[in-house]
Amino acid sequence: MAGPTGYKKGLQGGAWHLSPFAKKLTRRHRDAARADTVFEQALRAQTHYPQRIDALIAGGTYFIGKPCERCSSVKRRVFDCGCWSCKQAMRPIVLDYRNRLAKGWLSVRSRDGHAAILDAKRRETAGESYCIDAGDWSAQVYPTGRLAVHCPRLHIETPDLRTVPKARLFELGMANPELVEIMRRAGWSVD
Ligand SMILES: [Zn+2]
């Protein structure tokens, strides 16, 4: 097969061996892409979905892609391009130490999901975030999904776009394509 055989680059003095030609994109790919535009471009070249890489870099877990053949949802996982809804439905049942269904397991959240949420909260508290600029708009994406948006021209400064009512958000989005671009790059779905 033609093409690069692997990606090798020293990162912060350490050895960094990570192929951008991977079916599954993990946090390591995200960190490498954030640190290195060459790696980011290589990632973009190996996927049909530029929005998948946008979401990866922004710390998002899903993007809008091709409709699923089973359920026609367009929400796809950044990790492996799988259908978000189908993968949620197929999540394995978890048993407790006595081989019975774990109590309280009717929650939508998986244990992994819960651990991931705690991890996201911890990272947010530690000050981790990522900046997106679009025109005179700028936004800060936090690990928990909080999206702080700032536009001095319109005197908009909201610490969490998720708290803005949908109708108002729609109105803002119609008038400001930059905001829609920010939402898209932060991994928001538009529905
Ligand atoms: Zn599906």
Image (cartoon, grey):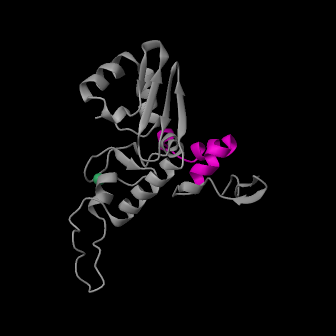
* Rendering coords of residue 18 (x, y %): 66, 58
* Rendering coords of residue 149 (x, y %): 44, 28
Q: Nearer the viewer, residue 100 or 120?
A: 120
Q: Quadrant of the N terminus?
A: bottom right
Q: Nearer the viewer, residue 164 or 136?
A: 164
The residue positioned farthest toward the front in the image shown = 125
* Rendering coords of residue 29 (x, y %): 59, 53
Is residue 79 visible to us here?
no
Q: Is residue 116 magenta?
A: no
Is residue 142 visible to us here?
yes
At horizontal 40% and vertical 62% (from top left) the residue drawn is 115
The overriding secondary structure of the stretch rendered in magenta is helix
Q: Is residue 38 magenta?
A: yes
The residue positioned farthest toward the right in the image shown = 13
The vertical placement of 17 against 50, above or below, is below
Q: Left or right: where does residue 14 sit relative to residue 91?
A: right
Query: Residue 169 lies in what quarter of the image?
Result: top left
Q: Which residues are magenta?
A: 29-52
Q: Nearer the viewer, residue 114 or 159?
A: 159
At horizontal 52% and vertical 57% (from top left) the residue drawn is 23
